[in-house]
Amino acid sequence: MLMPLDTCCRKIAELLYQSGQPSPRTLARLVEKTGFARSTVLSHLQYLQSSLLLDKQEILQGMVGRPKVLYKPAAKLMEELGKTKSD
């Protein structure tokens, strides 16, 4: 059983796991969808990742520039969110 997530973490988690399916998102998309400040979303993503509830995937986009980073729910988070949806 997970510890209860605060409002920001819960909103982010629900965006990453919509309609019973993982929905990987970028930081920019999460900021846009939540309406929270970039720094707020980033700190909550770091918390979720350190709690092993979130996976981070870097995708290289050629030889130049930063890789694209996708955040996606870990199995532990998907299992817990699936339980709360069916309750």
Image (cartoon, rainbow, N blue to C red):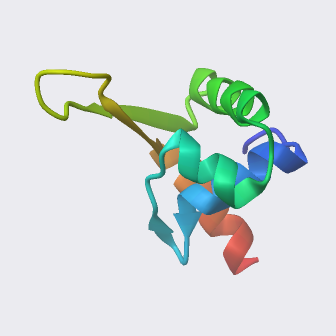
Residue lying at the far front in this picture: please name it: 64
Residue 37 % position (x, y): 79, 38
Residue 84 % position (x, y): 73, 67
Horizontal relation, residue 47 to residue 37: left or right: left
Horizontal relation, residue 56 to residue 61: left or right: right
Number of callouts = 0
Residue 15 % position (x, y): 62, 60
Q: Quadrant of the N terminus?
A: top right
Q: Quadrant of the C terminus?
A: bottom right
Question: Which residue is drawn at the image coordinates 73% and 32% (left, top)?
Answer: 44
Residue 68, image quadrant: top left
Residue lying at the far left in this picture: please name it: 63
Choose between 27 and 76: the one closer to the eye: 27
Is 65 placed above or below 55 here?
above
Horizontal relation, residue 30 to residue 55: left or right: right
Is 45 placed above or below 22 here?
above
Question: Which residue is drawn at the image coordinates 29% and 28% (left, top)?
Answer: 67
Question: Which residue is drawn at the image coordinates 58% and 37% (left, top)?
Answer: 53
Horizontal relation, residue 70 to residue 54: left or right: left
Question: Which residue is drawn at the image coordinates 55% and 62% (left, top)?
Answer: 17
Is 77 placed above or below 59 here?
below
Residue 65 % position (x, y): 27, 22
Residue 61, image quadrant: top left
